[in-house]
Amino acid sequence: MKLTDIENPFGGAVYYFDSCTSTMDEARRLAGEVPHGTVVVAALQTGGRGRFSSRRWAGTAGKNLTFTLILRYAGFSSVPGAVTLRSGIAVARAIEALEPVLAARIAVKWPNDVMLGDKKCAGIIAESDGSMVLIGIGVNVAEDFGVTSRKEAPDAVSIVSALAELDGAAAGSYAEAPHRIPFILEKVLFSLANTLSSGFDDAWREEFEKRLYLKGRTVRFVAGNTAVPRTVTGTLAGISAGGEIILIPDGKTEAEAFAAGEITSNCRAL
């Protein structure tokens, strides 16, 4: 079903599903038929996943924002650099604009999460074949993780849960979450239009580093671009111009850059 009451700055139609396996699946199915800027949004995903196939994205129908944006480009060289990181900035900005009281708690975790405090509030997946980019985004809006069993994401938090600690009235305004989600979708889309534009090419890295979760802290990192898994403990120094994470391993003075991998723990919290 097409939604006609959502303003989409990318110019494409917005397709809505009450339920689907995942918006990425539906976007792939529609990709050959729809133009640049098309959006696929679902009230419930039955087979949503995170960056790794073993991690599932589950939730209650109507409680969260899950969508995929389809973008088309002339070729690989035209695709914006660091799409996933720039999308993370967009989501962080949108949450901050929606609920300014949460601004001090919002951070972006390399490579694809948005954090509220030390818990994950949103995740991003980006896939590209060189001329088409699919950006899948999931935001925990009103999920109650106190009653929702989610072994795959024990450290998740929703906007409402975070708000409840600071502003009960604001949290209460989400009682009818399904009615708020289209508005949140618009906010995220307009934010994406800004952070993925060519005008942001020279600015994304500085903003990402300002928002970088655990920057300057000692972390444990598992590198994902080595033949044999390598665990590195060191200081999270920043992000390279190409979007790689930069660490200074313990006992060394020279920084190393990693294109793939995952921060598995904040060592100060161990």
Image: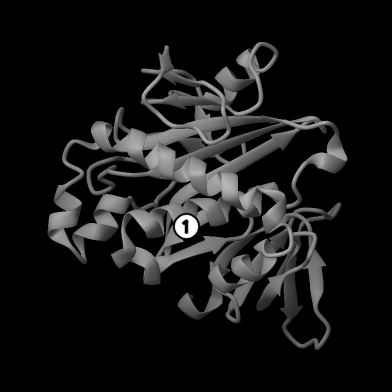
Q: Nearer the viewer, residue 199 or 187?
A: 199
Q: Residue at x 41, y 38 (%)?
A: 185
Q: How many marks?
A: 1
Q: Would residue 36 appear left or right of 140 to someone viewing this image?
A: right
Image position, residue 269 (x, y; %):
46, 76
> Camera-side residue: 227 or 185?
185
Provide residue 142's location: percent of width, then percent of height.
Answer: 27, 43
Image coords of residue 27 (percent x, y): 59, 21
**Residue 216: x percent and y percent?**
60, 81
Residue 155 visible to the viewer: no
State the residue position of label 1. Answer: 93
- Vertical placement of 26 versus 73: above or below? above
Examine the rendering and report whether any part of residue 133 can be seen.
Answer: yes
Q: Residue at x 56, y 46 (%)?
A: 192
Q: Is residue 216 above or below residue 185?
A: below
* Residue 60 in the image: above or below residue 214: above
Q: Identify the secondary structure beneath mark 1.
A: helix
